[in-house]
Amino acid sequence: MNQSAAANFNFNPDSLALTEPVPLILHPAEVYINSLGEGSRRTMREALNAIARLLTDDSCDASTLDWSKLRYQHTAAVRSVLMGKYSPAMANKMLCALRRTLKEAWRLGLMSIEEYGRATDIGSVRGKSLLKGRALSGSEISKLWNDCIKDNSNLGYRDAALLAVLIVGLRRSEVTHLDVSDFKPRSRSLTVREAKGNKERIVYLTQAGVRAVQSWLKVRNLEPGPLFYPFNKAQQVIPRRMSEQGIFRALERRGERAGVEHFTPHDLRRTFIGDLLDLGADIVTVSKLAGHASPSTTSKYDRRPEEAKKRAIDLLNVSLSTTSSSSQGAPPKQSKHPKQTQRVQAIPSNLKCPSCKSKELQKNGFQVLADGNKHQRFRCKNCGYVFTPLLSVPN
C-alpha cells in the first residue's frame, strides 16, 4: 500500500502538525521513547515515525506530529493501513507504540480520558507469521569455530570470543555493552547488565568459550573497558566499544570465509534457545537464560511442534512405501542370518521421554549439536517424540 492514510481517509495533514515546538518533557512521543530501554528506543521511534508519515502524507515525523489531536478515526485508519502493509507481529508492535504514546498524552494532560479511551479502542491485528531467520546446525557452528581457530590472528581471537558469547544466547545490543569486569572465568559467567527491559542476568559460557575469551583478552589486555573492540582496515585494534553493526559485519565476514550460508547474530540466539528446548531443558530456565520477560516468548522458538509435523508425515511415508512394495509383489527382505541377533547398547535406565516421561525408548540415529559433539537421538515408543539428550557418543 503506497498511499498514505491521510490520502486514503481524507485527513488534512496540516491539522495534525505541531503549531510550535514543545519541550521534550511535554512531548508524548519523546516521553514514551525515553521511558524505554536503550535497545528498544530506535525500534519504537522508527514505528512512530512511520505512523506520523502515514497520517500526514510524509510531512511529519514522531517529533513534529501533535499526538494529542489524534482521535478514533485516525487510529482506526492507521490500524487498517498497518494490517495490509506489515506482518501481524510488526503491526501490533507499531500499534503498541501508538497506544503508549497516546497514554503519555493523557498523562500529560493533553487529552481527556474520554478522548484517550476512544482513540485507543482499536483491536490488535490477528494472525501469526513464521519467525524470521533460521537455526544453525552443529556442523555450521563447527565450521565458524574452526575458521576462527585456524585464522591464528588477532581478528581470529576476537571473532572466536565473539562467537563463544553469541552462541549462549546474547543479543547483539547486550554484547556491545559487555565490559571486561563482566567476565568471570572461574565461574564461567558473564553478567549482562544492559539487557532488554533493564533486567540484569547471568549467563554461562562453555569451557571452550572461556578459553576463547581468555585468549582474546591476552590480545586486548586486561585494562578496564569494553570487552570487545573493533579493528580498522589495517587489522589494528581500535580501543572503543564495538557497535551492533560491527558485530553483524564481523559474523558476516566469518561466515563467508567458513562457507556457511548467510545468517545473523540473532540466528545464533535462535539456535541456542531451540537446542536447549530440544534437549528437554525446562522452558522457564531457558527463558531466564535468554532474558525473556515471559516463557511465552521463549515458546516461539520451540522447534518441537515442527518435529511432530515431520513425524506425522513420516507415518504417511511408511504407509505409502508399504503399499508400493505390496502392489508390486516385491518379496520381503530376509536376514541372511535369521538366528543371529544384533548387539544393541543398553539405553540409560534413568533416561525418560521429555514429552510423556516414558522409559520405553529406541535409538534413532545421531545429531551434532552446538557443542560440536555427536549425540545419540532417541524416539519414544509410547508417543513417538524424538529428542537428543546431552549424552556424548564417541565417533
Image: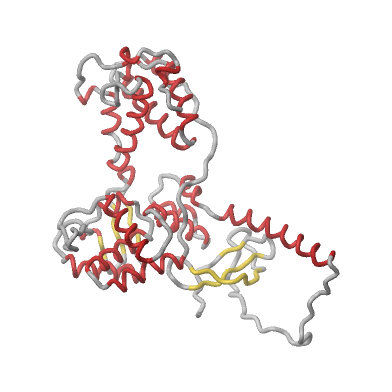
* Above or below, comparing residue 227 to residue 350 in the picture: above
Looking at the image, which residue is at 34% across and 19% down?
56
The x, y position of residue 353, in whole percent, is 61, 63
Looking at the image, which residue is at 34% across and 71% down?
208
Looking at the image, which residue is at 59% across and 71% down?
365
Q: In which quarter of the image is residue 179?
A: bottom left
* Above or below, comparing residue 35 to residue 117 in the picture: below
* Above or below, comparing residue 379 to residue 200 in the picture: below
Q: Nearer the viewer, residue 14 or 393?
A: 14
Tally of marks = 0
Q: Nearer the viewer, residue 190 or 10?
A: 10
The x, y position of residue 170, in whole percent, is 35, 54
Q: In this view, does 333 lie to the left or right of 228?
A: right
Q: In which quarter of the image is residue 157?
A: bottom left
Looking at the image, which residue is at 77% across and 85% down?
336
The x, y position of residue 146, in whole percent, is 36, 71
Q: Quadrant of residue 27?
A: top left
For the rendered model, the colour scheme is secondary structure
Q: Nearer the viewer, residue 111 or 6?
A: 6
Q: Is residue 302 left or right of residue 56?
A: right
Q: Is residue 145 left or right of residue 377?
A: left
Q: In this view, does 143 lie to the left or right of 26?
A: right
The x, y position of residue 313, in whole percent, is 68, 56
